[in-house]
Amino acid sequence: MEEAGSSPTPDLRAAHTLPTHTHFLNEHPSGLKVTNSDPDQLMASEPQPDQASAYDDKPPTAAGDGEKVVGDASPVDFLTCSFEDQPTTVMAEKPADIDDEAQDEMAGGVDPSQVSIDWPEDLQGFIVPTQPDLEALAFFEGGPKFKVTICSANIGNKMIRDMDDWVPVCPEHTDLVVLGMQESTYKVKKEDSGSDEEVVSSDEDADSNSETEAEMTGNESEAETPRASAASAASVEEEPMLASLEGQTPRGSRRKSSFSGSGRAPRKSVTESVWQHHTSKLAHQLGGNFVLLEEKKAGQMKLFVYIRIELSEQTGMVTNLVKGSENTGVGHVLANKGGQAISFTLNGTTSFCFVNSHLAAHEGKCDKRNSNIQEIFEGLANTGRFGNKNLDIAQYDHTFWFGDMNYRTALPEISDKKLKHKVVTDWVAEKNYAEIAAHDELGREVREGRILTGFHSAPPNFRPTFKVKRGEGVEYNMKRTPSYCDRVLWHSAPRHENNIICSEFTSCEGFITSDHKPVRAQFAVTPSPVMEIIEHVAPGESIFPQIKFSNLKGRDLHRADGPGFKSDPYVVFLCNPPNLIPEEQRKITTKSITQTLNPDWVDEPFFSLRARNYEELEKGSFTLLIMDRDWAVTGGADDTMGNVTLALRDICKAGDTEEGIFTFEEPVIRYGEKIGTLSGTIEVNTPGPSGVVPFKHSARCSTTVAAGANLGCKCVVM
């Protein structure tokens, strides 16, 4: 097989370093002490002709005052399996003597904490049981964990009346509150008369969103009058004014008041008017203890991140704050569908990324929804803002993906829509939510590796969130099969998956203005540990711990050059954290193998790991990034073919064996999809977790000739 020469140049490597999360936008939240967000610093850091762009993925050479440079996030590989097969049972018709009202009562509201469900074993781990949060205090109170609340709602293009059942009221013991909204365009009522405020908009008003328009926009909301009890009828007719916020700009808002000195409110766009309504409602709901850290709007979709004010006032607590979006509507311009993302690092240690999404609607459109996710992954990567542009948003320590994902309950063996509806509603009446989840499109697609590989969901111990009639309670629309359309998923890098628990995942059935019921999830996140890097070998040792890669083989890899073409793959080795290996070893790549999707690399690169023991090494990882060499004379950019991430804690366990060999064969992940496999052998001369085999040069090498402590001993690995 023909080989092409390697080009391990600094320029190539600069584009492939792991993210240090130092990319910033020119806009930043006022009143927050965010490292490197000062406009003067940003202007000073603008790229000069001979300098790298601010959006290049090259790590900074120096940190700003008070800045902690971190960048140890990476994607994860995933196992293969699925739910145990569950029989599909068509339930008998309800007895004639049970009326509809009694039937509704039988399927009444459910307190998830009171539901005990024997979930089938999910060997692949997509559904992860919730765990109790035993730590009472949040991080801002001196607790050991970050407490994160995520709230997602399809607003249904109706004015929000009451958030109490969805967004916590003045939440305690919480550090972050993240909110995602979909279909969130509506007319805002004025305080005095209850009439429509003057707005200028080309958006469709929800009241005229007919079935035909729903097909055109991809939204499924229909014009309905909310069903309300007598006690809530007044609030439906007129929006009460938030007295405590009258005449004020919402706390944390970076917008100035749009009212002029004439005493008359000027005409506003729907976007501005609704944005102010949202932030006013949220500020009132959350109380004075939270400040708006960042927000991202795209058409009918909005993403808000609120942070505890005590944290926002600490210099350096929030760093590397970026945001971006990818529209998946018509022509990638229409923003009725797509995703918005906000990422940042907390306390200099733990990187987060939050993605709010609204995917293609309607049953039978699963492939389209999958395509939307791929577009969001790739579109966000192509902004160059989210870490290494050749990886994806799953490179962060913890990534959360939520929204109206529109995946349906799949019962392909039942063609009759009414029968399908009845089967699912019977499961609902029995509280057999595990059976519904077993037929969930989203779970199936993740387990089969087509999307969001490595993401998890808590078990939905509640009734499906779609499609309900607007109003109190839960009554399903006969035109749609009840489904878990509204979701909250999470992904953690391999060395951080044990640092997070989901303590709550519930639906919010008291939210009455939409044909979806919102969802809310709560997480407790242990701050990511920081690896201690040593500049000199440990006392009593002659070399740093070492690993050597060999027998690397790729199979059935991605066709980066399109259908009918093969690729020229090579491997880039990314260590996390990057400074675990010496700087000169960060430029190492394999040679390119031309015109193949099944390469066998003969390269045997080795790396010295500048850590003193196994406890430190287990905090790190290696990402093997497969790239397609572009041989174009014009200098076209190389394309990503996917990556595999290996935790050093697993690799270094081989240090306890006599041979010191770690073998692997893992799926290659590209934008959340499994495409091909990568296998290989790693020889280790490192400390093992038990210390049974002492880390000594002589343990795996018959000679004592060394080539320099900082470069590793070549007699061990060459």
Image (cartoon, rainbow, N blue to C red):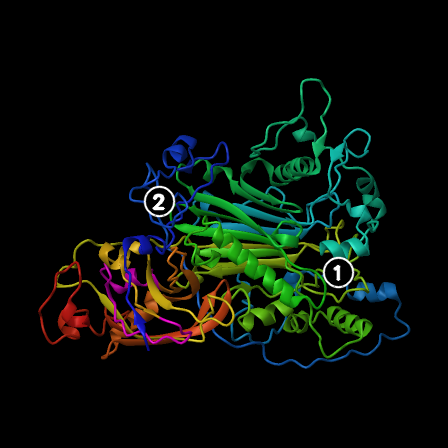
Nearest to the observer: residue 114 or residue 416: 416
Q: How far across and down, in percent of the image, does residue 7 sit?
A: 29, 61
**In the depicted structure, whether residue 485 falls above or below residue 276:** below
Q: Which residue is mark 2?
A: 52
Label disc, if present, on residue 467 of the rendered structure: 1
The quarter of the picture where the C terminus appears is bottom left
Identify the residue at image location x=77%, y=76%.
415
Residue at the location (48% across, 54% down)?
381
Q: Image quadrant of residue 414?
A: bottom right
Q: Give neighbour class at mark 2: few <14, some 14-19, many 20+ (Cα, 10 Å).
A: some
Segment tinted magenta in the rendering: 594-622
Residue nearer the viewer, 72 or 526 = 72
Amino acid on which the number 1 mark rests in the picture:
Lys
Q: Secondary structure at mark 2?
A: loop
Residue 304 sits in quarter: top right
Viewed as shown, does residue 280 lie left or right of 30?
Answer: right
